[in-house]
Amino acid sequence: MTRLGGTPRTVLVRGVNWLGDAVLSLPAVEALRRLYPDATIGVVAPEGLAPLWRMQPGVDVVESFEAAPGLAGLRDDLRLAGRLRRQGWELALAFPNSFRSALLPALARVPRRVGFATDGRRWLLTDRLTKTDEVRGAHQMDQYLALVRSLGYEGPLPPLRLTVDAERLGWAEALLECHQPSGGRRPVVGIHPGATYGPAKRWFADRFASVAEAAANELGALVLIFGRPGEAPWAAEAASARPGQVLDVTGHTDVAALAALLAQSDILVCNDSGPMHVAAAVGTPVVALFGSSDPARTGPVGPGHVVVRELVECSPCFARTCPLPASPYECFERIGVEQVLEAVADRLAVRSAESGRAM
């Protein structure tokens, strides 16, 4: 491992490309701030995740890019690298494991470049970390923190927290207030039925719809349906419950708006997904349904969360689609609506006791 002397004045993080991973990297960036309190810290992130990083008080500079594939992406990388080179960054950390994420700081001629020696990119890094089985089996947050520890950070893992400003919180509160009864308040249950990775991480849309309907009719909740534009089909099915008690905001929330609405919700029912981690980071408990993935590596962080998981022989397989034609998605088939509703009702009761208001 190459070590260049001196404390850096400028530190650049090549951020990850997925919302959930970005949220899980927040503690590592906070640890970086604690390690270098006087440095200028910047983050390079996809355009869609730039608002998340602009919300963080410990990040001074945010450079965004469009994650185009192929030659178009390479041209974009060259332009971005030229801009970063002129800014004169002294230290770079490549949080993703991809070749491309290490290529960018190398093209930008950052003198010290830290990352895991994966995906054939060893020669692009000056500080090369080995991704051991122990590291691979650790929670994703700890994997990002390992990069900062290699620089000398010895403190604890900082808490997972996502800062939402008062203006956005006020906007979310006002929006939800329009759908609350006069003089009263229904519990707010968020539902996110999607997962970008693939169907092996998505519980069935019709069962999410049943949960939404029961939450509205039996628990008296105001139900919020979240999702990216491409998740509209699953969201539409989940939003088909009782009119007036289900608000579908699919495709209408950027990262900042999503965080604000989740912060004003009492609970989120979801798959292993980006919104799950956003909810946890703003302090909202989740009922998370796990299929092909492993909660030990990507589970929700913090107190009050419930992981609903039915282990089968092949769990966890980490597949995008189920490879078993004879009994496809058995891990999700075994998770029933009543099981999920029971967890939701229990969490709402706990929230009610904590807040001192009826739900």
Image (spheres, helix red, strand yellow):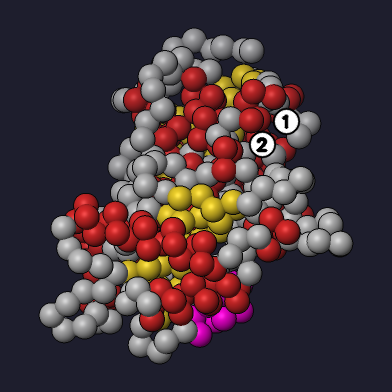
Q: Identify the amino acid type marked 1.
A: Thr
The foreground one among 275 and 303 is 303
Question: In the rendered structure, does residue 202 fall within the stretch colored magenta?
Answer: no
The foreground one among 336 and 287 is 336
Query: In the current view of this chain or complex, which residue is farthest to the bottom?
Result: 243
Asked whether, in this view, residue 179 is left or right of residue 255, the answer is left
Q: Which residue is mark 1?
A: 118
Principal SS element in the magenta part?
A: helix
Asked where in the image residue 328 lies, by quadrant, the reply is bottom right
The foreground one among 118 and 135 is 135
| Badge 1 vs badge 2, beta-carbon distance below 8 Å | yes
Residue bounds of the magenta highlight: 230-240
First along the sequence among labels 1 and 2: 2
Please state the horizontal and vertical placement of residue 69, each as a whole percent of the image.
72, 56
Q: Where does the N terminus fall, quadrant-wise?
A: top right
Asked whether, in this view, residue 255 is left or right of residue 336, the answer is left
